[in-house]
Amino acid sequence: MIANAMNRSASRRRILVTLAGILALALAVPVHAQGSDKLTLRQAITLALQNSRDLKVARMQYTVALNEVGIDRAAFLPNLYTGSGAAYTNGFPSVGGQAPAAFQVNYNQVLFNPLLKGDQHAAEERAKNQKLEADRVRDDVEVRTATAYLELGKVRHSLELMRTEQASGEKILEVIRERVAANQELPIEVTRQQLGGARIQERIVELEDRDQALSDQLRDLTGLPDDRSMEVEAEDPTLTASLSSALSDSELINLAIQNDRGIEEAANERAAREHILHGAKWSYFPTVSLVAQYSLLTKSNGYLDFYKNFDRNNVAVGVQVTIPIFAAKTHANLVLARSEMSLADLNLGVKRQQVRVDVREKARNVRELDAKREVARLDLQLAQEGLNLSQAKFDQGRATLQEIEQARLDESEKWVGFLDADFARQQAQLVLLEATGQLAKVFQ
């Protein structure tokens, strides 16, 4: 008997272990499937940066700007040309001041030309602006992706709440109909409740359409296929921690001035104008170029008739110095460069002041939205506590079903209001992070 009992106990243990294993496997499969479709905020931004066509165009434009600088730099590098031709001459054997040659090689390299060098340095400074434009496009992609992602999370959470609110409204409608049938309510209350239900349905339809639009936008940004369902998070903890870091207005202004790309572009343009002005000042001095030429002259042009000593192989190597004696254009270039330099200084100062005003406005907007979010949070907390009290009364038989469902409706409405306030604050803080140059650090 004891042996049989022990065998039965062992059999039960084996059955329980087997069932537990099957249950664990069954639970693990859907979790894995959901995880494969889960898209975090950082994953979305990484995919968007990899697939953004606008960012690829901006980077290619920066490459084009660098190649344009190479053209200006080429004048100071060796340039070697060769060619051949044929010409008929009658009289002195010359074509355009040069002797006709069967074969000719020319070498040219600028050694000192302040005006050309100033243009080269100015092009290098302006190419930096194209790099800044690529960085601005990158930030824009990050902001658009983060905004679409966070709004999609907010919309889906709101949809869940509105559907819960719809279910509560239907329960209240049934209670009201029963009370009307018992002559305890006026028929108008049924119509009033139906109107409330229609408004909830209208809001649900709007949220479903917004869900679809944001999903399409996020797929377009990230390059995800249309047939893949996306699960998003309503809020990113790391992002929230970064957004919550409080800085004074002076610290925000300093960060904005240090990182604002508009100011950097204005500073680069000022540096470009400074290089041009420097070149214009030095253009009163001589320019120096290294030149060389080799020509293989022909005998058919009558050189033997004009020269007693004729050598078909001609080589000339030297330095060409051009000394300006009177050049009206040089003075005009200098006057223009000085006026453009003054304009660049003014633009830089104006840009700095605009950034100060703009950052103060963005910081004030964030503070106001923080306060609105706190009000919405407390309003939601109050509704939740009221729902708990109604539930306790209902459990004790001191509240009706209509009262507790109405409390659930109020709580759902406060939830939606809180989600809207929270998303508005997130949008404002993303804009402030972009303005102060901290956006890339958050999404690293």
Image (cartoon, grey):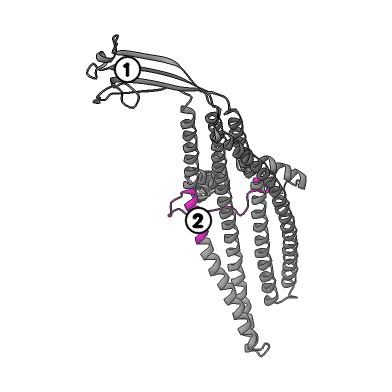
- 178 shown above or below 332: below
Which of the pair 171/363 is nearer the observer?
Answer: 363
Q: Which residue is outermost to the bottom? A: 183
As drawn, 6 above or below 227: above
Indicate the amino acid at tag 1.
Answer: Ser
Q: Secondary structure at mark 2?
A: helix
The quarter holding residue 105 reads top left
Q: Mark number for residue 217? A: 2
Magenta stretch: residue 54 in it?
no
Identify whether 124 is placed above or below 422. Answer: above
Say which of 423 and 409 sits in front: 423
Seen from the viewer's position, the closer of residues 242 and 6 is 242
| Circle 1 residues within 10 Å: few <14, some 14–19, many ≥20 | many
Of circles 2 and 1, which is in front? 1
N-term mark: 2 or 1:
2
Q: Secondary structure at mark 1?
A: strand
Residue sitting at x 43%, y 54%: 226
Label 2, label 1: how many angstroms apart (C-alpha)?
66 Å
Residue range corresponding to the magenta coloring: 212-240
